[in-house]
Image (tube, helix red, strand yellow):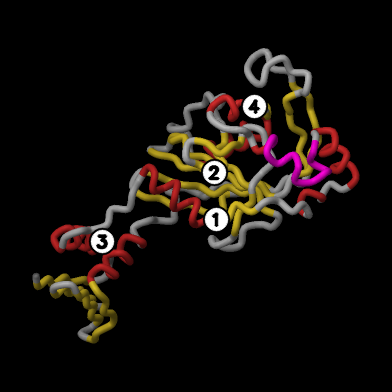
Amino acid sequence: MDLRIEIAGEQALCRQDGVEAYSAPLGDFLAELAQRSDYLVLPEPIPEGVRSVRGRGDAVTLVIETNLPCATVRWLADESPVPFGKNAVYRTACLAFPFVILIVTFRAGGLTGLQQCFYRTEPLEKFTDSLLLPNLYNVAEAYGQKCWLCLANLQTDLRPLCWNEKVRVLRSHLWGGAWNKSSEHHEGNSYWGTMRGLDPRLKSLGAWEKATRQDPLFALKVQWKPLGKTVTEIVDEMLAKVAPRPTPVTAAHLAQVLSLSKNQSAQKTLFSFRL
């Protein structure tokens, strides 16, 4: 295949085997090129539960879905003398959950502080699926994120770990750690406080436990509050904070980018520029 890309002034033209295959204003062509600068693969098997992987440079964002109809968790007790920390008091509770969606952005394999937690009542099927606000301790609107997940007590350095281990550590910390008011200490009220009036079955930990015993799947029927954004929109926002898209701004820059693409491809590609 002979693919030739020509730029004449403000117009981009692609010819395939001598036949015009694509023509567009240069600005539209550059925007499409930038959109395709992300990659969707890991250098190793994708961990279980990971529904999406997007990378840009040394930044990677994972979308992790957990389907645990009921989970036994450690929850801050009403009588706890402190909201979190070594003197906090907890009790265990078996609670029903909808689908829990973690979206976490890494850089050079380590956490970046960009990590969010959402709900869904159905499994993810497409990137335009919408997300729901949770009713959890440790999750709050903070640090420029709508559902920032506090991972302050996660002491493990994730950078040297393989991707399966990174995801395993995150899952273990989320479900095996303690749910408390740590996010409220950092910046804002947790969603446990703001969502208590959403449904009578969620007004207290005791009510949540009782509803779970009566119907372990009731959380899938709750009218959770919509976030108003899709998976793609959240991933775009998070990646943009650590790795803005490198949009070519000159013909010379574009030639460099396309030349790199050519060297990585088995196809024969020629580039012609008339400025």
Badge count? 4
Badge 3 density bin: few <14, some 14–19, many ≥20, Cα 10 Å: few
Mark 3 / mark 4, whichever is N-terminal? 4
Q: CA distance from mark 3 to mark 2?
A: 36 Å
Mark 1 / mark 3, whichever is N-terminal? 1
In the displayed orientation, state which residue is furthest to the bottom: 19
Label 2 SS:
strand
Q: CA distance from mark 1 to mark 3?
A: 33 Å
Foreground tag (1 vs 3): 1
Label 3 SS:
helix
What residue is pinned by disc 2?
146
Residue 104 in view here? yes
Label 1 SS:
strand
Q: Amino acid at mark 1?
A: Lys
Mark 2 / mark 1, whichever is N-terminal? 2
Q: CA distance from mark 1 to mark 4?
A: 26 Å
What residue is pinned by disc 1?
229
Q: Do residues under tags 2 and 4 come within 8 Å of each other at their CB atoms?
A: no
Residue located at (9% from left, 70% from top): 275
What residue is pinned by disc 3?
261
Residue 210 belongs to the span the image colors magenta: no
* Residue 181, numbered label: 4
Q: Position of residue 229 (x, y in %)?
A: 55, 55
In the displayed orientation, state which residue is furthest to the left: 275
Q: Position of residue 69 (x, y in %)?
A: 77, 46
Residue 2 in view here? no
Residue located at (13% from left, 73% from top): 9
